[in-house]
Every structure is written in C-alpha cells, then in structure tokens.
C-alpha cells in the first residue's frame, strides 16, 4: 500500500516539477530576446526591438495577472502607430491566461501536498520500511520519464501535429488559429519559437527527473545492502 501511495504522490510531485520548469522558462525574458534575434522577429513584424520588447512585457505581465489588459502600441513600418494585438488575439489570450492561472494553482497545490506526503511516508517509516516508499517513487519517476520521452519524440518528429493536438485538448474554440498576415502574436511566437521552448522545458525536466531517479536508486541500494532486504 505504501508503494502505491508513494507512486501516486510521486506522479503529482513530478508533474509539479514539470510545471515549475514551464512556469520559469516560459517567462524567461532572456530566452525571448535570444529567440527574437535568432528568428529576426522584429524585422519580420516591421517594428523596432524596443517596441517588440514592450509588447512582450505586456503579454507576459498579462498572463501573470500583473495587468488587466493587452493594450500596447507600436510604430509599424507599414501603418504607423497602432495597437499591437487585435481583438481575436486578445480573446485567445483570455483563454490562455485562464488556463495558465487555473493550472498554476492546481499543480502547485498538488506539488505541495505530494511533497508533504512523500516526506511523511519517509519520516514515519522504519529504516528498512522506507524501501516500499522509495520503490513507489522510482515507479512514478520511470512512468513520467517514459511519457516525456514518448511525447518528446512525437514533438520532434511532427511538432505541428503535437502543437495542434495540444490546442484541441486544452481549448474549446478556434481562437488559437491566427492568421500570420494579420496577427502580430503568431509572428512573435511562431512554431519554431514554441519548438525551442518545449525542447528546453523537456530537457530541463528530463535531467532533473533523472537526477532524482539516481538519488532514489542509490538510496534503495543502500537500504537493501544494509538490511539485506
């Protein structure tokens, strides 16, 4: 029973760790700056880098619930000064913000509960009785690593299909289908941008999960060797 509870807690713990990487890396301003330079984003959109940075700050602050709207202006090479985001983009970002804020609260709550549960199981168990708890965590770690590997392989082979599937799962409308001829947002963060971001998140999580798995495997071996169980 301890092994099952530990495995269940471990799944939520690792999902929480994954979301932590999503949370941190998705709002890393230096990443946006590097991607914009690499993809020539400002030039493609036809605005200055300063205006692009301002539009990005507005977008990220909105998603983090640090501002109430997406009203920001830029001086476009074709058309002069106007609002960056159109009505369809704003409507889509309402959905994105709701998804992000709801997911953030739920996942971090699960992370806190699962971490506390794993610690309670370890502390309350006798020395050799910690083994089922550790085995349960190893089970969850392996399951999540396999899932991330499969999803990562799918994304690498056909990122467009992966990204489309993601939107069909999490959004109930088609507002996410933006026209690159009229949408600044889709040109700010095109498919290549998201591919690079998802790759960065997946690699960071995989390395962390692998390190935690190694620690758990080492603890398991020490207990088995010490108590001959």
Image (cartoon, helix red, strand yellow):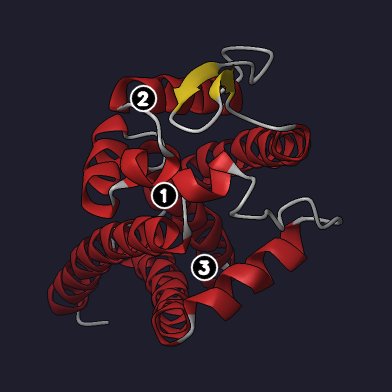
Circle nearer the N terminus (2, 1) = 1
Where 184 falls versus 220 (above or below)?
Answer: above
Separation of residues labelled 3 and 2 (CA atoms):
43 Å
Q: Which residue is mark 1?
A: 17
- Secondary element type, mark 3: helix
Q: For mark 2, give the secondary structure.
A: helix
| Res 220 → quadrant | bottom left
Give coordinates of residue 163: x percent, y percent. Answer: 57, 68
* Residue 29 place in picture, x, y as percent: 31, 31
Q: Quadrant of residue 184?
A: top right
Q: Nearer the viewer, residue 208 or 122?
A: 208
Report the number of discs: 3
Which residue is denoted by mark 2 in the rendering? 53
Q: Which label lies toward us, 2 or 1? A: 2
The crowding category of the residue bearing disc 3, from other C-alpha atoms within 10 Å (few below 14, some 14 to 19, many at least 20), is many
Residue 106: where, in percent of width, then height? Answer: 66, 40
Q: Work out how far the residue at label 1 is from the one at label 3, CA to CA, in angstroms.
A: 15 Å
Give the Cα separation between the discs numbered 2 and 1: 29 Å
Secondary structure at badge 1 equals helix
- Say if 38 sits above or below 87 in the image: below
Q: Between tags 3 and 2, which lies in front?
A: 2
Q: Earlier in the sequence, mark 1 or mark 3?
A: 3
Foreground mark, 1 or 3, reads 1
Residue at image point 62% right, 44% down? 183
Quadrant housing residue 210: bottom left
Q: Which residue carries the number 3 mark?
A: 7
Tags 2 and 1 in contact by the CB under 8 Å rule?
no
């Amino acid at each position: 029973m301890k092994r099952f509870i530990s495995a269940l807690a471990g799944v939520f713990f690792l999902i929480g760790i994954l979301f932590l990487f999503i949370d941190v890396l998705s709002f890393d301003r230096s990443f946006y700056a590097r991607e914009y330079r690499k993809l020539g984003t400002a030039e493609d959109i036809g605005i200055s880098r300063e205006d692009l940075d301002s539009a990005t700050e507005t977008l990220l602050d909105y998603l983090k619930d640090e501002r109430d709207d997406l009203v920001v202006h830029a001086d476009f090479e074709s058309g002069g000064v106007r609002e960056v985001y159109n009505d369809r983009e704003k409507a889509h970002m309402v959905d994105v913000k709701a998804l992000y804020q709801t997911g953030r609260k739920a996942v971090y709550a699960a992370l806190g509960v699962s971490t506390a549960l794993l610690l309670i199981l370890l502390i309350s168990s006798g020395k050799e009785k910690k083994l089922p708890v550790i085995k349960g965590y190893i089970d969850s770690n392996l399951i999540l690593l396999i899932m991330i590997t499969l999803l990562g392989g799918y994304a690498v082979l056909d990122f467009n299909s992966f990204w489309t599937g993601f939107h069909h799962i999490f959004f109930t409308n088609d507002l996410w289908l933006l026209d690159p001829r009229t949408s600044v947002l889709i040109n700010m963060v095109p498919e290549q941008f998201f591919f690079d971001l998802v790759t960065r998140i997946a690699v960071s999580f995989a390395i962390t999960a692998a390190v935690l798995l190694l620690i758990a495997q080492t603890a398991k071996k020490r207990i088995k060797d010490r108590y001959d169980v």
